[in-house]
C-alpha cells in the first residue's frame, strides 16, 4: 500500500511540475495531452521501479524523468534548450548523490567510488560532446550540457554506447526524413536521440 501511494504521489508531482515548467516556456497542453503525459510518467516510473535493482539508480532516474521530458519537449517544440532546465537537473542529481553518500558515511560505508563513478560519467560525456561540438558543429551547446547531465545520471559505464546510439538513431531519422520529405538541411532536435541512447542503455541493454 505504501509503495502504491509513493508511486501515485511521485507520478502526480512530476507531471504537475513538468506541465508547470512547460507553461512557463510557452508550451500549453490540453487536458487530454496532460492525461497522456501523466500515463507516460507513470509507465516510466513503474518500469524503472521493476527493473532497476539499485536504490540509488532508481532514485536518480526517477528524478531525472522531469528534466528529460522538459528538455526534450521544449527542444522539439521550440528548437531551443534552456540552460536552467539542465542546471536544475544537475543540481537535483548532485543532491541525491550527496544525500546517499551522507547515509553511507553515517553507516560507516565508503562512498568515494560512487562520487568518482558519476563525476567521471559526467566529465567523460561533457568532454566528448564538446569536442564533437567544436570540431563538427553537428550539435548545439545545449546538447553538450544535456550530455553532461546524462553522464551524471548514468555514471561511467556504457557512456560510449549512449553516444553511439544517439548518433545512429538521429542519422537514421535524418535519412527517413530526407526520403519522405526531401528535408536536406539536416536540422533536427538532438536531445530526443540522446535520451533514446540513455534509455536504450539503462532500460534495455543492461537488463539483457
Image (spheres, rainbow, N blue to C red):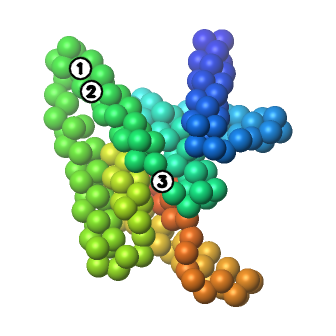
- In what element is the residue under mark 3? loop
- In what element is the residue under mark 1? helix
The crowd level at tag 1 (other Cα within 10 Å; few <14, some 14-19, many 20+) is some
Say if 110 sits above or below 139 in the image.
above
Say if 19 sits above or below 71 in the image.
above
Q: Which mark is first along the chain, 1 or 3?
A: 3
Q: Position of residue 95 (x, y in %)?
A: 32, 28
- Marks 1,2: beta carbons within 8 A: yes
Say which residue label 2 marks: 98
The crowd level at tag 2 (other Cα within 10 Å; few <14, some 14-19, many 20+) is some
Q: Residue at x 40, y 47 (%)?
A: 83
Q: Residue at x 50, y 75 (%)?
A: 168
Say if 41 sits above or below 180 in the image.
above
- In what element is the residue under mark 2? helix
Q: Nearer the viewer, residue 62 or 87?
A: 87
Q: Nearer the viewer, residue 198 or 38?
A: 38
Which mark identifies residue 146?
none
Q: Nearer the viewer, residue 205 or 63?
A: 63
**In the image as oriented, which residue stretches furthest toward the right?**
32
Say which residue label 1 marks: 102
Say which residue label 3 marks: 81
Q: CA distance from mark 3 to mark 2?
A: 27 Å
Do we see residue 50 in this rendering? no
Q: Which mark is first along the chain, 2 or 3?
A: 3
The crowd level at tag 3 (other Cα within 10 Å; few <14, some 14-19, many 20+) is many
Does residue 126 appear to the left or right of 113 in the view shown?
Answer: right
Q: Position of residue 123 (x, y in %)?
A: 24, 54
Q: Residue at x 78, y 35 (%)?
A: 35
Q: Residue at x 64, y 56 (%)?
A: 77
Amino acid at each position: 500500500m505504501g509503495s502504491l501511494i509513493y508511486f501515485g504521489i511521485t507520478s502526480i508531482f512530476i507531471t504537475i511540475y513538468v506541465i508547470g515548467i512547460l507553461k512557463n516556456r510557452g508550451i500549453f497542453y490540453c487536458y487530454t495531452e496532460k492525461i497522456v503525459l501523466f500515463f507516460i510518467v507513470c509507465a516510466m516510473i513503474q518500469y524503472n521501479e521493476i527493473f532497476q535493482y539499485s536504490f540509488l539508480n532508481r532514485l536518480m532516474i526517477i528524478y531525472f524523468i522531469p528534466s528529460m521530458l522538459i528538455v526534450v519537449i521544449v527542444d522539439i517544440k521550440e528548437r531551443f534548450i534552456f540552460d536552467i532546465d539542465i542546471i536544475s537537473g544537475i543540481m537535483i542529481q548532485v543532491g541525491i548523490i550527496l544525500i546517499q553518500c551522507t547515509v553511507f558515511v553515517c553507516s560507516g560505508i565508503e562512498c568515494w567510488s560512487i562520487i568518482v563513478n558519476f563525476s567521471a560519467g559526467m566529465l567523460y560525456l561533457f568532454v566528448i560532446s564538446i569536442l564533437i561540438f567544436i570540431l563538427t558543429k553537428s550539435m548545439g551547446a545545449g546538447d553538450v550540457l544535456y550530455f553532461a547531465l546524462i553522464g551524471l545520471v548514468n555514471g561511467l559505464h556504457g557512456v560510449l554506447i549512449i553516444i553511439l546510439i544517439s548518433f545512429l538513431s538521429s542519422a537514421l531519422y535524418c535519412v527517413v526524413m530526407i526520403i519522405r520529405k526531401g528535408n536536406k538541411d539536416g536540422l533536427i532536435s538532438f536531445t530526443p536521440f540522446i535520451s533514446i541512447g540513455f534509455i536504450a542503455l539503462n532500460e534495455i541493454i543492461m537488463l539483457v
